[in-house]
Image: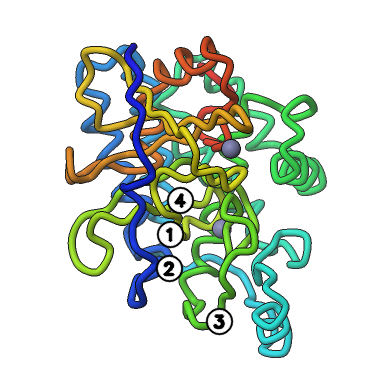
Amino acid sequence: MTTTLLQPGQIEAAAGGIPELRLPPADVFLTQARRLEQLAEGHAMADYLRFAARLARAQQDILDAGPAGELPSAERLAQCLEYGMPPLAPAGLIRPSGWHGTARQLARSVQPFLTAAGQAALQPMVEGADAWLNEQATRLLENDTQHLHAAVAPIVGAALQVHWTHLARRLDPAQVARPEHPNLCPVCGSHPVSSVVRIGGAENGLRYLHCALCSSEWHVVRAKCSNCDNTRDIAYYHVEGGDRVVEAEACPECKTYLKVAHQEKDPLADPVADDLASLTLDLLMDETGHAKSGINWYLIQGQL
Ligand SMILES: [Zn+2]
Ligand SMILES: [Zn+2]
């Protein structure tokens, strides 16, 4: 592994006209699935990447069908905008009633492709009572991984993503205030998975953080720690000999890192899929003493 120090000269000018918020596109999970399938070819984690791809395809099917969920009232949305609060924060929103069914459907979609042990591990998800599923969702949303049923966590996360992504798609960017803290999603207040430098159109060359829950993306200038706002001595790490499509942007102040997927190096680079496929970089960053500030729910339970 080698380190490159970048100067904050790469920071984009805070000019007007930058799309600050990208609400999720209609095919967000399909895009992830295709990228996961591509990255799985010849990959040491091929089976796991294909599992995540199947899960993402199942998520897309449910998103296409229009899952349940009610947006907050117009009054509440206006209030959130005025006070700079994320309108879809899980704590302030009634959990969509259909999410249990979504979770069971997702589990059943991926089960046939798993080993016997993997199928058995997901059975509590298929048979679990709504109350148990609610408890798992609360633990996941509160990042209480210690008390989470690890084997079902990616499915619980995937189900919540479908409903929140559907709700986020029904918002207008003008209804959402700029984030108070650059590490939290302005739409739902969740942490990012990682970030992506996009290409094309008004977003060309801009870095966006991708939400772990609602799939929205928000603009944060490059060479700036999204966790603590520091812009000094930001360092970029990559796996030696790799293609540098994914780098870890590391902060010497708060000792955290967030990955950056570069579409200018690979136009199909995806903040969720490429994060999952670059686990080696996470292991190397762990050795450097930096903690990951992004969360990828697909990865929580390790191996099926
Ligand atoms: Zn969000
Ligand atoms: Zn920092």
Residue 230, image x and y in percent?
Answer: 56, 43
User: Is the Cβ of the residue at disc 4 closer than 8 Å to that at disc 2?
Assistant: no
The quarter holding residue 203 reads bottom left
First of labels 1, 3 by sequence position? 3
Residue 288, image x and y in percent?
Answer: 52, 13
Labelled disc at residue 219: 1
In terms of secondary structure, where does tag 3 sit? Answer: helix
User: Is the Cβ of the residue at disc 1 closer than 8 Å to that at disc 2?
Assistant: yes
Q: Label 1 crowding class (10 Å Cα cut-off): few <14, some 14-19, many 20+? A: many
Q: Label 2 crowding class (10 Å Cα cut-off): few <14, some 14-19, many 20+? A: some
* Amino acid type for the residue under numbered disc 3: Gln
Judging depth in this view, the residue of 13 and 36 nearest the camera is: 13
Q: CA distance from mark 4 to mark 1?
A: 6 Å
Q: Nearer the viewer, mark 1 or mark 3?
A: 1
Residue 150, image x and y in percent?
Answer: 66, 25
Q: CA distance from mark 1 to mark 2?
A: 5 Å
* Amino acid type for the residue under numbered disc 2: Glu
Q: Residue at x 18, y 61 (%)?
A: 200
* Amino acid type for the residue under numbered disc 1: His
In terms of secondary structure, where does tag 4 sit? Answer: strand
The residue where tag 3 is placed is: 175
Labelled disc at residue 209: 4
* Amino acid type for the residue under numbered disc 4: Leu
Q: Quadrant of ligand 1?
A: bottom right
First of labels 1, 2 by sequence position? 2
Labelled disc at residue 20: 2
Q: Is mark 1 within 8 Å of ligand 1?
A: no
